[in-house]
Image (spheres, helix red, strand yellow):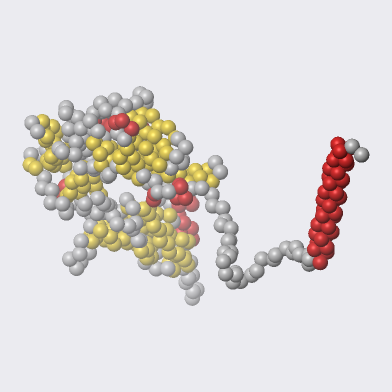
Amino acid sequence: MPLVYLFGSKWRLVLSTLLICAVILELAYCQKDAQEQRTKPRRKTSLKKPKLGKSNKGTRAITPKPKVKATPTAQGQTFITQVLNRGKFKKVEDTISVPTGDTLELRCRGKPVQWSVPSYLEEEDDGRLRIIQNERYSALTLVNSTGADTGEYTCYPMYCEENDCRKEYDKAVKVFVFFPDPQELFVPSSDYYEVIQLRTNWPTVLPCQVTSPEAKVSLHREYPPVEVAVDGTEISFDVKKGFTIHRPRSHHAGALYCVASLGNLRQSSIKYMLIYVNYPMAPPAPVIQASSSSMLVGENLRVICTVVGEQDVAVEFTWEYPGQQIGRPLYTQESISPVSGGSARQQSQSVLLVDEVRDVDQGTYTCTAQNLQGAKSASTTVRVVPKAKPKKL
């Protein structure tokens, strides 16, 4: 046999043997794996129920939080910032000063919010004031500012339910802005004088508003020409408001004005005509009493209505009585007298007179007393009895 043929047959035999061995090993491996799958216990999948009460260690029970409708309170505290040059921001204090002619730019955090500005800006509409509501804040921009723009700028957060929105006054933020004017120390006014009513025990403000917080302000009386003492108790001054008379009295009445000075500049304000009104603390409390609750026909009836109140407080009386229905005229007598005992009180009285009462005068008599605080009524009932007929002899 040739050598080449013998050598080729040998290699074919080797390759066939290796191939048969590989097939045997693969079958053995597959059989073993199938056997292990049959003998291995199968896991049962089950849905875990949530346990009530105390949770297992390492787990944390999470309670979903209820969804809260976004309001200004949930968004954070409302505050005002001032936009300075070059994109810088500054949280404002109670007051700030901006030179006249410069631009005032304020931002109020919140959505939505509403601005309140000095009345002068609300009345005019020359395009200098612009307010834009952005996603997270509202921007107020005032250009070409003047001393007349001095005043309080307020930002109100709004509480909205669907389309109904209202101001949250208790969460409002304010800033008082001065616009110092080298030519005008007082905020300009179109009036020459202003009439102010002084009410007893009601604080009254004389709005001598200056454009610069550095101005020195004093209060003066026109006649006699004297400076009015400001002691901080009876009368006080606030650069953001003016002068306040805390407990007005009759001696405060008259013509007053303010004087402001800054450097070499000295100016006077408009005049304030103060008229004193003794304003009562409360409506009157009338007390009514008839001369008798039962009258004979032909007798004279007196119904008295009395009010005891503060001194120098005017009380007006009105009556309703049965005789009105037939046109019986009203006859009254009114008087004022001091109350004894040294107290500053007075008695006001109205007496209704009905001469020779008749059947039509029977009924309810009502007295209404009124002062500047309001009115109250009191009533009494009168019965008219016919006269007894004389016995025949």
Q: Residue at x 19, y 30 (%)?
A: 181
Image mark count: 0
Q: Can residue 274 be seen from the camera position used here?
A: no
The answer to whether residue 46 is left or right of residue 211 is: right
Residue 194, position as x, y percentages in the image: 23, 36
Q: Can residue 50 be seen from the camera position used here?
A: yes
Instruction: Tell me the quarter of the picture where residue 254 sits.
Output: top left
Residue 47, position as x, y percentages in the image: 73, 63
Above or below 109: residue 64? below
> Farthest residue in the top direction?
126
Front residue of this view, candidates 302 and 6: 6
Q: Residue at x 18, y 46 (%)?
A: 237
Above or below 381: residue 248? above
> Farthest residue in the right direction?
1
Instruction: Tell me the quarter of the picture where residue 54 sits.
Output: bottom right
Above or below 43: residue 104? above
Q: Residue at x 19, y 36 (%)?
A: 212
Front residue of this view, candidates 276 and 316: 276
The answer to whether residue 255 is left or right of residue 112 is: left
Front residue of this view, candidates 37 and 71: 37
Residue 144, position as x, y percentages in the image: 29, 25
Instruction: Tell me the quarter of the picture where residue 90 sits.
Output: top left
Residue 213, position as x, y percentages in the image: 19, 39
Image quarter hosting the N terminus: top right
Front residue of this view, candidates 307 and 30: 30
Q: Residue at x 23, y 42 (%)?
A: 240
The answer to whether residue 138 is left or right of residue 216 is: right
